Image (spheres, rainbow, N blue to C red):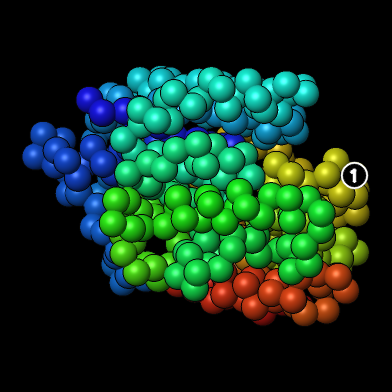
């Protein structure tokens, strides 16, 4: 079978690669598995997800290798190792690549992956904004590209691809420093390798509401693999809060964030705070001390943690990917997901000018969630 190569740098990316493989299995052999295949480009908010595939249904993993371009922070590495083991349990080949460890790691990684990249008929990308992935794609332009969700960045990727813009993360300011100028040729070439053309097809596999750029296929991710493998969860009486790394990325003021968490916890009777893997230990300590919430550092993506349970009957989140993914992963369980928008006064003075509009769009397009009035 023609080779398929996936590059992932976060636990969520690896989860969504497994979801893509599962969806491909259902699409290619629905009669054998006794399940309805996922429908491409489904409009979100119209109907509930199709029933999950039977537990134990095999993944179409033949010819697929997942390359983990391991990050340096311990929380991400720990979650990735757990996700890598889940993938191996499904029969998927996983190669762990310490691409950022030491001075010679980059050159060694490029040399080691050049051959598999040239041989791959399809490349699956978890983060099209990753400088590492962009550099790898300059080595070889695959004939088929699939981009799976890496959080809400997928929405910005689709929009930038449609407008023909350079690939820049939404929370970064528009100024270009020396590093950006040096990497500009790589980013420009990578963008062309991620765009559809006469000799390249591009698929976006997503649970988010995106408008497909011209020539691109959008396939809905309804988390059928997650629902077939885990749960349903036991529900607790209280609510759970979901943390965000908006403070760490320089978007939201830390004091305003803590005030919002305090008010939300009191209003909704929350007892637990599920931390984002990038949240700092200092911030989490302050949340635990000043709010009384039990801070939980999940060892797997929240979609899997919530599906396994126990989980609150209400999950409250700020604008993030989970306001789109959790209603799909928890479909039919009775859990309510609510989103609290980011108020303009919470933003830092040097936050990206696009931040408010982007975050409002994330919350406003979450059609399966309840909107909260803050206060």
- Report the side of 13 relative to 132 (left or right): left
Residue 294 lies, in percent from the top left, at 77, 44
Residue that mark 1 sits on: 282
Q: Residue drawn at (23%, 37%), measured in percent from left and top?
A: 25
**Is residue 170 shown to the viewer in this render?**
yes
Image mark count: 1
- Report the side of 51 relative to 10 (left or right): left
**Is 73 drawn above or below residue 197 in the view shown?**
above
- Report the side of 205 relative to 325 (left or right): left
Q: Residue drawn at (59%, 37%), measured in percent from left and top?
A: 9
Observer-nearest of 296 and 68: 68
**Is 155 drawn above or below residue 329 in the view shown?**
below
For label 1, the SS is helix
Rendered image quadrant of residue 131: top right
Residue 39 lies, in percent from the top left, at 23, 57
Q: Residue drawn at (70%, 42%), measured in percent from left and top?
A: 277
Q: Where does the C terminus fall, quadrant-wise?
A: bottom right
- Report the side of 323 relative to 244 (left or right): left
Residue 295 lies, in percent from the top left, at 76, 43
Q: Residue drawn at (67%, 28%), measured in percent from left and top?
A: 106
Rendered image quadrant of residue 259: bottom right
**Is 319 drawn above or below residue 25 in the view shown?**
below
Observer-nearest of 227 and 132: 132
Residue 82 lies, in percent from the top left, at 56, 25
**Is residue 323 shown to the viewer in this render?**
no
CA neighbours of label 1 inside 10 A, class few (<14), some (14 to 19), many (20+): few
Q: Where does the N terminus fall, quadrant-wise?
A: top left
């Amino acid at each position: 079978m023609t080779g398929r190569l996936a590059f992932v740098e976060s636990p969520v990316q690896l989860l969504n690669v497994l979801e893509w493989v599962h969806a491909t299995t259902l699409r290619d052999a629905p009669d054998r598995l006794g399940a309805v295949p996922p429908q491409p480009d489904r409009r979100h908010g119209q109907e509930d997800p199709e029933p999950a595939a039977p537990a134990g249904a095999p993944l179409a993993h033949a010819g697929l290798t997942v390359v983990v371009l391991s990050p340096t922070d311990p929380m991400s590495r720990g979650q990735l190792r757990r996700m890598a083991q889940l993938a191996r349990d499904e029969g998927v080949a996983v190669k762990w690549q310490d691409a950022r460890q030491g001075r010679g790691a980059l050159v060694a990684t490029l040399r080691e992956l050049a051959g598999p990249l040239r041989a791959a008929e399809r490349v699956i990308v978890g983060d099209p904004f990753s400088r590492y992935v962009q550099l790898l794609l300059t080595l070889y332009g695959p004939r088929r590209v699939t981009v799976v969700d890496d959080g809400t960045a997928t929405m910005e990727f689709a929009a930038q691809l449609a407008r023909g813009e350079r690939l820049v993360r939404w929370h970064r300011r528009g100024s270009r420093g020396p590093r950006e100028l040096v990497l500009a040729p790589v980013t420009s070439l990578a963008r062309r390798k991620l765009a559809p053309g006469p000799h390249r097809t591009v698929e976006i596999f997503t649970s988010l509401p995106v408008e497909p750029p011209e020539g691109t296929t959008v396939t809905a991710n309804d988390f059928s693999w997650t629902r077939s493998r885990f749960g349903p969860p036991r529900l607790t009486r209280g609510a759970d809060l979901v943390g965000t790394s908006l403070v760490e990325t320089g978007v939201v003021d830390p004091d305003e964030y803590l005030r919002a968490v305090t008010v939300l916890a009191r209003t909704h009777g929350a007892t637990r705070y599920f931390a984002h893997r990038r949240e700092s230990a200092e911030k989490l300590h302050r949340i635990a001390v000043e709010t009384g919430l039990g801070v939980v550092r999940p060892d797997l993506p929240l979609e899997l943690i919530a599906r396994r349970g126990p989980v609150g009957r209400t999950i409250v989140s700020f604008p993030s990917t989970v306001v789109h993914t959790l209603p799909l992963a928890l479909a039919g369980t009775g859990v309510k997901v609510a989103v609290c928008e980011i108020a303009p006064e919470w933003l830092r003075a040097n936050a990206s000018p696009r931040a408010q509009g982007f975050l409002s769009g994330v919350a406003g397009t979450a059609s399966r969630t309840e909107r909260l009035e803050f206060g």
